């Protein structure tokens, strides 16, 4: 189900078999309709729909290994850690056994003991309800899909460029980076034996190798190999190398070819698989002792829009941090949102994740004169950027053609019913959306002599195809594209002339990439933390061409930026081995170079600078602040900074404030203490208080940075943002129950449909308003509460459906009579819940 709100596809589909499953010793799933959950997507729509079945992730209250290590101050032995891990698993066994005595059989798929305490399993509604009521349980959480966070990858590396983040004399030697992604082609010579035999969470791959599509063996997982090249590659064409060519890479295959909702094969990961991957990253040999944890963990995947601060993925990231593994994640590739909550992907909203956006660092781009005519009239005459293949060696003139419109775009829509190409020797006009590289490749395979793209988020000039194909790709301005599209649909002839390419300065140099997701996260925290090069980076591809030459290509996306930052973290860890995970992240984030003219919510602290980080003397946590929303002039907020001296001398420190927007003038900050002398190795806590000091002018967000200014050293910037005004509180847009009168039935339930959360329009952008929790409770006609029927946590906007079987929360058949359902939607931000009542009758 989809509707439109200001250009964003709003709804997801999430059907849950609830309520009222029979008890009396029956096993899970014997009487309940099968639960189905899938995320369609808030933007784009080209991501494959994923069915997770009845799988959920259960988080338990007993401390994990990470929590116990942190409580002990980190000074524990390997035998202690192994004993603690065993005790966590034993506690899980006790809970599962107790539930078994109540008739609930739990077959766990993954067990977690290190980064968090919990498990994933397929569970029916009764099991979920019992677990939600169990004193041992924190909560039962949905399992989401995460996808490779790249967009518009191109085969052929000659069009790509190299990231500029490096630290002279250091290459990451002695540091292990865990790569949580698809499989990696370890035979790629560019990776030079730096890739260890890894861990395959998805299954079916020996040593976490890049796996082929089971239905199309020539189609191999690419993303893991691409990120591996950005991390540890070396000896490539023209001296091409990764950010940390001396580091060791541990591939952990948490994503790969898996069945999608259509029955085909798609590349994705489930969030329970990602948590299992983090378990392996902190304990590679699986013996319960995390002293062999990877120093850095790079997650190259993104769960769209799931910027929750306390979901299982975020909890797992925090657990890895406690075990001294820095987790670097992409912000996502969904562009700009906000100004309240943005479009950050999960686990990018995790406070302990170093979340990375993408900046365009290409010094030059290929451009050519492009003239478009409709009939005899010229509708475009400009010099435009060309894609990765560059331009023709001599001017060309072509007619423009459209492929067929298809519900699921593919190669077939470039051919007519008789198998004749619609675009052969012509220029194909495409809207590439979320799979631009596939669409360009399909057009070229169909014989297109040029490709004209419009409406995508890939920066102009970053999209193309294999240069050997000599097929230029041109990014059209939106207005010209609309004119051309209208003319073609009216049957008019459109022609395009493309001149000889020439190289010139990149006008987007140093700017945030248009696809890079921005914050705030759902706890009000500024995300991303930093930016790194993420446009048209040259890297490895799996396999070789027909002549046996290793493949190379380019990659766009915040996963590429995250790989550059993970490599920089490895180099910094080699240069300064005494730094822990928090110190590494703090120096990388807080010494970043702010980009003039870019919003704090798009860039965080700015572009990462490895040299500045290596010279830093003070590290601060958190890396960004979460003040959230100021509903009135009476609002005050409080945050605490932990400042640590990581130098070899006493350092004097002053705290001051930078304001970046006009609305920030209404905000006043105080710091206690505002000046201090921090001895070598010492730590101090600074309490920040914010208040509204004047009448608010409009509701535009206020942004800026708290500056920790060490005497004789570079200042550190910790970004903040405050949004104004009261949030929209109606978070239940539609509630319907059909039928309202029914007999109890385990196999033909009544259907409760709830449209929960919303996507609102604010300041010209779409703002996601999710729920912390959605509860459905059953009440009788006398106003007595009979119990909890269903609870959903971390709810993204969408339609959710629940099957009512006519049984009580305890499993007994309901007597005839009238009943009421109470639906309660709790927002993630402070504020009252939205409540709806729905009546029904059991006959």
Image (tube, rainbow, N blue to C red):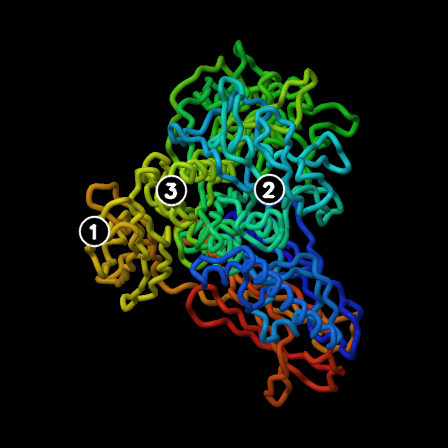
Q: Which quadrant holds the C terminus?
A: bottom right
Give residue 705's position: percent from left, percent from top: 29, 50
Question: Viewer-proximal residue, 244 or 820?
Answer: 244
- Which residue lies at the image location 58% right of the left edge and 40% below the top edge? 250
Residue 443 figure quarter: top right
- Is residue 602 visible from the viewing direction of this image? no
Mark 2 and mark 3: span between their CA atoms? Answer: 23 Å
Question: Viewer-proximal residue, 553 or 697?
Answer: 553
Give residue 836's position: percent from left, percent from top: 55, 74
| In the image: residue 155, left or right of residue 716 | right
| In the image: residue 150, left or right of residue 643 | right
- Is residue 659 visible from the viewing direction of this image? yes
Categorize mark 3 by other alpha carbons within 10 Å: few (<14), some (14-19), many (20+).
many
Of the numbered discs 2 and 3, the one sitting upstream in the chain is 2
Question: Viewer-proximal residue, 336 or 571?
Answer: 571
- Judging by the rendered image, the residue that carries numbered circle 2 is 181
Of the numbered discs 1 and 3, the one sitting upstream in the chain is 3
**Callout 3: helix, strand or loop?**
helix
Give the number of callouts: 3
Q: Which quadrant holds the N terminus?
A: bottom right
Rendered image: mark on residue 654: 1
- Judging by the rendered image, the residue that carries numbered circle 3 is 588
**Callout 1: helix, strand or loop?**
strand
Mark 1 and mark 3: span between their CA atoms? Answer: 20 Å
């Amino acid at each position: 189900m989809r509707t439109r709100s200001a250009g964003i596809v709003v709804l997801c589909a999430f059907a849950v078999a609830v309520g009222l499953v029979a008890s009396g010793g029956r096993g899970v799933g014997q009487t309940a309709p099968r639960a189905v959950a899938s995320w369609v997507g808030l933007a784009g729509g080209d991501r494959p729909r994923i069915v997770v079945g009845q799988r959920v992730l259960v988080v338990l209250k007993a401390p994990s290994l990470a929590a116990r290590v942190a409580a002990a101050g980190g000074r524990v032995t390997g035998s202690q850690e192994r004993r603690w891990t065993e005790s966590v698993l034993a506690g899980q066994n006790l809970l599962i056994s107790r539930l078994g005595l109540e008739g609930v059989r739990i077959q766990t798929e993954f067990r977690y003991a290190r980064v968090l305490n919990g498990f994933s399993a397929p569970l029916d509604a009764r099991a979920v309800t019992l677990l939600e009521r169990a004193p041992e349980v924190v909560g039962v959480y949905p399992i989401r899909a995460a996808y490779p966070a790249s967009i518009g990858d191109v085969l052929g590396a000659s069009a790509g460029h190299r990231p500029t983040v490096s630290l002279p004399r250091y290459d990451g030697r002695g540091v292990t980076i865990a790569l949580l992604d698809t499989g990696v082609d370890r035979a790629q010579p560019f990776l030079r034996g730096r890739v260890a035999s890894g861990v395959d969470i998805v299954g079916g791959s020996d040593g976490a190798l890049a796996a082929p599509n089971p239905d199309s063996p020539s189609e191999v997982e690419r993303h893991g190999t691409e990120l591996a090249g950005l991390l540890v590659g070396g000896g490539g064409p023209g001296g091409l190398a990764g950010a940390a060519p001396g580091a060791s890479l541990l591939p952990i295959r948490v994503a790969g070819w898996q069945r999608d909702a259509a029955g085909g094969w798609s590349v994705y990961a489930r969030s329970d698989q990602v948590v299992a991957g983090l378990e392996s990253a902190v304990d590679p040999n699986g013996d319960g002792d995390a002293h062999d944890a990877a120093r850095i963990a790079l997650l190259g995947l993104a769960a769209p829009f799931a910027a929750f601060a306390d979901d299982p993925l975020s909890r797992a990231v925090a657990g890895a941090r406690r075990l001294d593994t820095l987790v670097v994640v992409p912000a996502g590739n969904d562009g700009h949102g906000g100004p309240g909550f943005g479009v950050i992907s999960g686990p990018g909203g995790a406070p302990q994740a170093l979340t990375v956006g993408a900046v365009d660092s290409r010094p030059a781009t290929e451009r050519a004169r492009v003239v478009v005519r409709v009939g005899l009239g010229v509708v475009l005459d400009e010099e435009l950027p060309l894609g990765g293949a560059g331009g023709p060696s001599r001017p060309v003139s072509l007619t423009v053609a459209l492929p067929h419109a298809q519900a699921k775009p593919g190669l077939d829509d470039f051919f007519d019913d008789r198998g004749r190409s619609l675009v052969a020797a012509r220029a194909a006009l495409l809207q590439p959306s979320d799979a631009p590289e596939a669409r360009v490749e399909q057009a070229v395979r169909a014989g297109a002599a040029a490709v004209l793209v419009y409406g995508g988020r890939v920066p102009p000039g970053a999209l193309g195809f294999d240069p050997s194909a000599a097929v230029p790709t041109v990014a059209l301005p939106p207005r010209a594209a609309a004119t051309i599209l209208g003319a073609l649909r009216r049957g008019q002839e459109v022609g395009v002339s493309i001149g000889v390419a020439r190289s010139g300065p990149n006008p987007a140099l140093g700017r945030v990439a248009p696809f890079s997701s921005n914050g705030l996260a759902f706890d009000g925290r500024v995300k991303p933390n930093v930016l790194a090069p993420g446009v048209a980076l040259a890297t490895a591809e799996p396999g070789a061409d027909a002549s046996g030459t290793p493949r190379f290509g380019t990659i766009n996306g915040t996963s590429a930026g995250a790989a550059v930052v993970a490599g920089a973290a490895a180099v910094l860890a080699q240069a300064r081995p005494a730094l822990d995970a928090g110190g590494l992240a703090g120096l990388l984030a807080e010494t970043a170079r702010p980009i003039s003219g870019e919003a704090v919510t798009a860039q965080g602290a700015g572009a990462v600078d490895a040299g500045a980080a290596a010279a830093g003397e003070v590290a601060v946590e958190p890396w960004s602040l979460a003040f959230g929303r100021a509903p009135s002039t009476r609002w005050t907020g409080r945050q605490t900074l932990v400042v640590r001296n990581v130098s070899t001398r006493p350092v004097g420190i002053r705290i001051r404030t930078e304001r970046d927007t006009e609305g920030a003038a209404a905000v006043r900050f105080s710091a206690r203490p505002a000046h201090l002398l921090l001895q070598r190795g010492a730590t101090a806590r600074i309490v920040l208080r914010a208040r509204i000091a004047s009448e608010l002018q409009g509701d535009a967000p206020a942004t800026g940075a708290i500056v920790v200014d060490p005497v004789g050293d570079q200042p550190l910037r910790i970004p903040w943002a405050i949004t104004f005004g009261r949030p929209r509180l109606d978070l239940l847009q539609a509630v319907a129950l059909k039928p309202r009168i029914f007999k109890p039935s385990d196999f033909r339930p009544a259907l409760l449909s709830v449209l929960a959360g919303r996507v609102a329009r604010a300041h010209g952008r779409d703002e996601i308003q999710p729920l912390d929790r959605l509860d459905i409770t059953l009440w009788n006609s006398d106003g007595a509460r009979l119990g909890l029927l269903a609870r959903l946590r971390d709810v993204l906007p969408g339609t959710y459906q629940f099957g009512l079987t006519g049984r009580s929360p305890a499993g007994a058949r309901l007597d005839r009579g009238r009943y009421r359902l109470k639906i309660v939607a709790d927002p993630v931000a402070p504020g009252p819940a939205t409540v709806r009542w729905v009546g029904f009758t059991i006959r």
